[in-house]
Image (cartoon, rainbow, N blue to C red):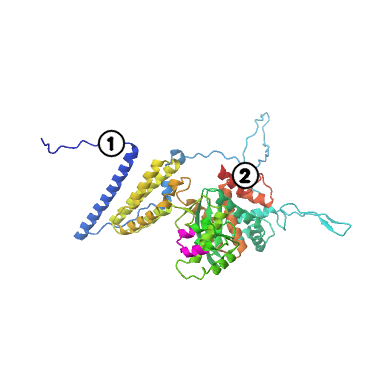
């Protein structure tokens, strides 16, 4: 006997595991967002047919810059930070103040302490009377000057000038006026010389900091900003991670320029397996690669030697697109980077600028979400579709942060499937759909964190680092000489590196200039290497 209208038993979800329930929930939420979008579209179409006006497009007040903070769980203790008494780090000088008008018969009850902090700034002029002797053979023997004395300005005033200019972000005219006000006999030309001359040791240490960071770091993040030099527009590139920062100002922001900076002061070009692999990945023509590989020369000391090699092989004169000489040069630069042991297993995290797409590459999620945030919407349907996608991205970003804290193989597969569902969806908003397809094409770079959970999900550190260069540009405008440019980049990078390593920049300058310091400051590259090994 056939029974009609029999109802199916209800689905028992109590026995499902969280790994099964969460994908089902995400699928239902995505389907609900799609239905809401279709419903709004139908309502707009009905209103249009009736001749009614639609809702105005009002952008929400949220900003993409808070994406990382918005996905963090804050405790109540973070909102109520108690500030206790702070003890001064400088030596304490005790002064006893005697009481006056003490009545007869009073008893002494000890002291009541009241501590203040003060500062003493005064010029100090020292005349070194150096003994001079004439030997029997006619030679003159002169007593040496103390360590750190090389000209007529001592290490303390040099430390003050360097700290005020680079860390304090003051200008040269104001710095000269301040020094003259407190009694120092110094001119603007002399201050500029202190800032730009005889600083080769600092520039060399900044270069060694970059080498240590590229050798020992698991990841680096990169960014660039505009910078003027000799009255012309240029670009300042930042390279760094949580242990170091390096700046370099150049006239170009090409991929070849970035690869040249990654050589960390070396100027050679190398043709090795990594170089040829890069050329093949960039789809350089096979005959051109064969011509380079068939020649016995593999190492070229400088750009002139490399350019002569390209001319001899007839590669430089090829007029095709993309330019074979450019791709071959980028490959030889990457070969030099790997030949020096830099970036071995290091991930480069960037904001999707093309010049940074080298080696093992990862993309910043904040910049990816910002592309969606900046989309202009002109209908309610488009606005709702955009906000639904943003909500899914923020949710996915929060789960990526949780995965970094506790990586799991099963969780990794689920996140990859969710990524495809989010960025393969079609909302009906054509501009948004094209953007989602573009972001999905960057799947490997955006999901690099699943294989390398130690890397960050954003380039906020780079944007924070490079802000000091932006301030310096607004304060001073442009550098006039190559030594001035190199010193500005070196000192700003060293100041940032000292902060990341927990070192006072004031103590660092004193230790390097021979001024009086409480604790010795080891070389920054050795500290970076030790921190990476810990």
Residue 279 marker: none
For this view, does 421 lie left or right of residue 88? left
Helix, strand or loop status at disc 2:
loop
Q: Which residue is mark 1?
A: 13
For this view, does 337 lie left or right of residue 194? left
Q: Which residue is mark 2?
A: 117
Q: Is residue 280 magenta?
A: yes
- The magenta span reads 278-291
Observer-nearest residue: 518 or 213?
Answer: 213
Observer-nearest residue: 160 or 267?
Answer: 267
User: Can residue 306 be seen from the camera position used here?
Assistant: yes
Compute the Cα span from label 1 to label 2. 67 Å
Helix, strand or loop status at disc 1:
loop
Observer-nearest residue: 187 or 373?
Answer: 373
Residue 23 occupies quadrant: top left
Taking the view exactly as shown, the residue that stands out farthest to the left is 1
Residue depicted at 75% across the width and 54% down the height: 126
Q: Is residue 25 magenta?
A: no
Q: Position of residue 2 (x, y in %)?
A: 11, 37
Observer-nearest residue: 323 or 50?
Answer: 323
Mark sitting earlier along the chain (1/2):
1
Q: Quadrant of the C terminus?
A: top right
Residue depicted at 55% across the width and 61% down the height: 249
Discs 1/2, front = 1
Residue depicted at 20% across the width and 57% down the height: 46
């Amino acid at each position: 006997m056939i029974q009609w209208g029999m109802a199916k038993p209800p689905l028992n979800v109590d026995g499902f595991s969280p790994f099964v329930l969460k994908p089902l929930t995400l699928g239902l939420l995505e389907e609900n967002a799609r239905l809401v979008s279709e419903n709004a579209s139908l309502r707009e179409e009905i209103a249009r047919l009736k001749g009614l006006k639609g809702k105005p497009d009002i952008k929400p007040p949220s900003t993409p810059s808070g994406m990382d903070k918005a996905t963090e769980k804050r405790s109540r203790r973070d909102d109520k930070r108690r500030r206790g008494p702070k003890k001064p780090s400088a030596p304490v000088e005790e002064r006893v103040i005697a009481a006056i008008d003490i009545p007869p018969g009073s008893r002494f009850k000890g002291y009541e302490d009241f501590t203040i902090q003060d500062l003493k700034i005064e010029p100090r002029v020292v005349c070194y009377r150096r003994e001079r002797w004439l030997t029997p053979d006619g030679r003159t023997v002169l007593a040496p000057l103390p360590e750190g004395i090389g000209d007529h300005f001592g290490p303390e005033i040099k430390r003050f000038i360097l700290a005020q200019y680079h860390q304090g972000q003051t200008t040269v005219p104001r710095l000269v006026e301040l020094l003259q006000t407190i009694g120092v006999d110094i001119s603007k030309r002399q201050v500029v010389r202190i800032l730009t001359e005889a600083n080769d040791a600092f520039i060399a240490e900044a270069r060694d900091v970059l080498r240590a960071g590229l050798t020992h770091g698991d990841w680096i993040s990169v960014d660039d900003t505009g910078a003027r030099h000799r009255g012309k527009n240029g670009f300042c590139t930042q390279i760094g991670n949580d242990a170091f920062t390096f700046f370099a100002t150049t006239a170009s922001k090409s991929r070849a320029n970035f690869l040249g900076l990654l050589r960390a002061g070396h100027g050679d070009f190398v043709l090795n397996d990594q170089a040829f692999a890069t050329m093949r990945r960039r789809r350089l023509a096979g005959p051109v690669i064969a011509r380079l590989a068939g020649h016995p020369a593999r190492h070229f000391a400088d750009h002139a030697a490399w350019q002569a090699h390209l001319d001899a092989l007839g590669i430089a004169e090829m007029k095709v697109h993309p330019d074979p000489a450019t791709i071959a040069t980028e490959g030889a630069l990457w070969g030099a980077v790997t030949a020096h042991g830099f970036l071995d297993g290091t991930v480069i995290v960037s904001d999707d600028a093309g010049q940074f797409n080298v080696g093992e590459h990862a993309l910043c999620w904040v910049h990816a979400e910002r592309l969606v945030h900046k989309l202009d919407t002109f209908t309610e349907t488009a606005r709702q579709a955009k906000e639904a996608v943003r909500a899914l991205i923020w949710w996915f970003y929060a789960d990526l942060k949780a995965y970094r804290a506790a990586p799991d193989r099963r969780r990794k597969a689920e996140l990859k499937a969710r990524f495809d569902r989010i960025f393969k969806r079609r909302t009906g908003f054509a501009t948004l759909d094209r953007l989602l397809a573009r972001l999905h094409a960057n799947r490997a770079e955006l999901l690099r964190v699943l294989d390398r959970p130690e890397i960050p999900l954003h380039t906020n550190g780079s944007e924070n680092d490079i802000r000091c260069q932006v301030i310096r540009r607004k304060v001073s405008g442009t550098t006039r000489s190559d030594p001035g440019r190199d010193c500005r980049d070196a000192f700003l990078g060293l100041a940032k590196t000292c902060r990341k390593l927990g070192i006072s920049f004031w103590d660092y300058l004193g230790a390097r200039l021979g001024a009086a310091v409480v604790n010795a400051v080891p070389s920054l590259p050795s500290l970076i290497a030790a921190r990476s090994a810990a």
